[in-house]
Amino acid sequence: MTYQQTIADADTAIATFGQHWDGIEAEPAARMRLQNRFHTGLDIARYTARIMRADMAAYDADPAKYTQSLGCWHGFIGQQKLIAIKKHFGTTKGRYLYLSGWMVAALRSEFGPLPDQSMHEKTSVPALIAELYTFLKQADARELGGMFRDLDKARGLGNAVEAQRIQHAIDHYETHVVPIVADIDAGFGNAEATYLLAKKFIEAGACCIQIENQVSDEKQCGHQDGKVTVPHEDFIAKIRAVRYAFLEMGVDDGIIVARTDSLGAGLTKQIAYTREAGDIGDQYNAFLDCDPVDTVGHGEVLISRNGALMRPKRLASNLFQFRPGTGEDRVVLDCISSLQNGADLLWIETEKPHIGQIAGMVNRIRAVVPHAKLVYNNSPSFNWTLNFRHQVFDAWSGEGRDVSAYDRARLMSADYDATELGIEADRRIQTFQRDAAREAGIFHHLITLPTYHTAALSTDNLAKGYFGDAGMLAYVEGVQRREIREGLACVRHQNMAGSDVGDDHKEYFAGDAALKAGGAHNTMNQFAA
């Protein structure tokens, strides 16, 4: 709806119901409507689901059109990310939010910092989804408020051309609200618990929910040891629970990301129920590490395999062990069964960022499900520098190139930064996402924990200088001066926090009697130039 149409609608409402609404005007009401176009989280979930579905279709037609996100642990972080994207690229298209359960556990729990083991309050996740979208909506209100003030200024100067240009920009305004991929861990309980929590996610605005095939009460970070998976039917029940939650909430095109941790998980908590040879339970059990049975001991668990009794290897923890070397086969089966039972996208947790490894599994999956697509974790748990230097070293060695100038055990050393190998490794890191989207079916690239690390790094740098010899210059030179010269809107922090939007409202509500914060004596005016 255009600016003028929104004003006309507000004018109609006032004319219909506002016989005694002295001082209520259509244009301020229209502006407030445009600044708050999303009234509920469900409005956001429906809007962003359509965007994500369109992006998935675009990727199917052209793998160069992959999407990206960065994990955000606070609404302000997500807001600044989207403001930066609009500033640098002019559009938010193809850029999403990612919400990591790891960061919620580490940074948002009332218990304090926790490991990624689903011990944090599960309602803290939908609370963060709602917080992220509150901050993105505020970014809209702030930016549009500036455009409205510019429009008033152009009108006041009698500059009709400039006023028309600004109004056109308002009519075609692009919101900061984008899709979110939200981590529900392993569902925080059984399928019913998963369904109830998924509804909270969706009510908060999530159009895309990521769920993993680990045992909920044994859950580990995907990059740590001790992971335990569940049989496929248990996981499929949770996928269905999420799908029913989307359908119940009226987000029919909501997206489910099915994550498998099987590549690094060597254990299962239970033996799958099987009805007949070759069914999904039997295929799961076929990966169990078993010994032939000669004698039966007290309390032993046995299974039948090809007519013979076998003893699955059971640990003291009462967990059963998979055969070594079966991880990729289990991943492929996990992914196919998930896509055939309601999932839209896949997530394969890997131990290294290796395109050939990922593509090998995806090609096997696509032989059964041709349009299978991945969400991939470009994880900070990988040592990217070392991994890619190893990949280049090994590739060159395999090609017969002379690598005698390089010590493979020392490739992380800064001594190699400017070498041919170091430069080639960096080039491969730079093109990794584009190459993996083309060769390995990756639709969405994300970094789970980047803003955790950037917060630590920037704070370390400031603390080193400020509490050292640089003193106040550490802040001025390292932060404020850069904000000014690099055009960060946040340098005017009062404006970013909503002071100007509040002043607009005061003027709407009190007219000439409004006591506004943005007057001549506001020190933020020092940053106007």
Image (cartoon, rainbow, N blue to C red):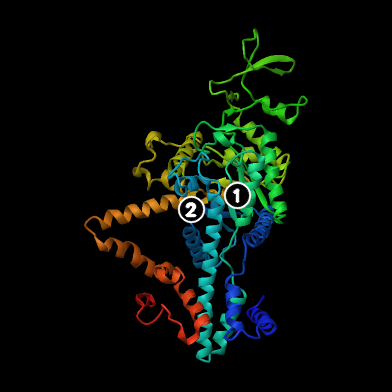
In terms of sequence position, does the residue under pointer 1 or pointer 2 come before the other?
2
Q: With 487 as the anchor, is 10 left or right in this view? A: right
Observer-nearest residue: 135 or 181? 135
Residue 253 showing in the rendered view: yes
Q: Determine which quarter of the picture holds residue 30.
A: bottom right
Observer-nearest residue: 232 or 115? 115
At mark 2, the secondary structure is: loop
Q: Which mark is residue 73?
A: 2
The residue under the point 61% across, 52% down is 201
Q: Determine which quarter of the picture holds residue 290.
A: top right
The quarter of the picture where the C terminus appears is bottom left
Q: Position of residue 32 (x, y in %)?
A: 58, 75
Q: Position of residue 385 (x, y in %)?
A: 43, 44
Q: With 245 as the anchor, is 516 left or right in this view? A: left
Toward the top, the furthest residue is 295
The residue under the point 42% across, 67% down is 490
